[in-house]
Amino acid sequence: MSYIGRQPTAAALTASDITDGIVSNAKLAQDIISADTALGAEPATTDEFLVSDAGTLKRMDYSYIKAANTPAFSVYNSSDQDSVSAETWTKVTLDAEDIDTDSAFASDKFTVPANEDGKYLFIWFVWVAAGDNNLQRVHTALYKNGVFARYGAVADWTNEAYRNSQGYQAATIMDLSAADYVEVYIKAWIGTGDATIESNASGVRTTKFEGYKLIGV
């Protein structure tokens, strides 16, 4: 700015010195948050929003507010699990995956990822067989951190004809914290010999384990 005579004293620019609406998006640096560009897809988990936290303006990742039932998984056993001993809690082998959103299922167990504490819904289905009508009673359960936590399906035929095979489905909700892990177990009472946890019957998967985190509870 040109001037005549003495140079004016420098003074800080204030909001009252700028007419409302005079600064356009074109005059702003690219790192300034504005509504100049539209987002045409769901935000990435690291996309940020501005929020007022008790009057203090803060930025927040979309991951904290997105509605998604994850972590989620759906796994099954790819082959029969033989030699299941009678009256012994036995962990179910689950070595194949359809869904594993957070890579949290491994070694036949689901482990809660970091920062994913909450309530989880679990559903499991196990098909047990023992030939010659030797299957007398079956219990299924979920173990949490290696310890019995929930009973699932319970079947008892001690007062009627025993069975060759039977499927057992159960579901439960569990409150879990990061690093907690969950596994499926069965216990079978058998007339003679061992039982088998079957992977399929007539081409249909019969032993599987599924779960996901519940949102808003």
Image (spheres, rainbow, N blue to C red):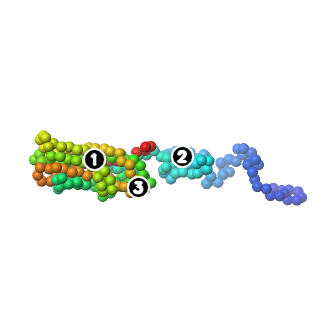
Question: Residue at left 73%, top 49%?
Answer: 15
Residue 39: image tag: 2
Q: Nearer the viewer, mark 2 or mark 3?
A: 3
Q: Position of residue 207 (x, y in %)?
A: 25, 48
User: Alpha-carbon distance for marks 2 and 3?
Assistant: 33 Å
Identity of the amino acid at label 2? Answer: Leu
**Few, some or many C-alpha atoms within 10 Å of disc 3 (few <14, some 14-19, many ≥20)?**
few
Q: Nearest the camera: 53 or 212?
A: 53
Comparing 129 with 199, the one in front is 129
| Residue under the point 27% across and 49% down | 141
Q: Is residue 159 left or right of residue 117?
A: left
Secondary structure state at the residue bearing disc 3: loop
Relative vertical location of residue 124 with respect to residue 103 in this rendering, above or below: above
Q: Are marks 2 and 1 in contact (CB under 8 Å)?
A: no
The residue tagged 3 is 178
In the image: residue 109, left or right of residue 167: right
Callout 3 amino acid: Ala
Expressed as whole percent of the image width and height from the top left, the position of residue 128 reads 19, 48
Label 2 crowd (10 A; few <14 / some 14-19 / many >=20): few
Contact, CB < 8 Å: mark 3 with mark 1?
A: no
Check disc 2 and report its element: helix, strand or loop: loop
Q: Which residue is depicted at the point 15% across and 42% down?
A: 157
Residue identified by numbered label 1: 151
Question: Do we see residue 16 in this rendering?
Answer: yes
Q: Quadrant of the N terminus?
A: bottom right
Residue 203 in sight in this render: no
What's the CA distance linking mark 3 and mark 1? 22 Å
- The amino acid type found where label 1 is placed reads Tyr
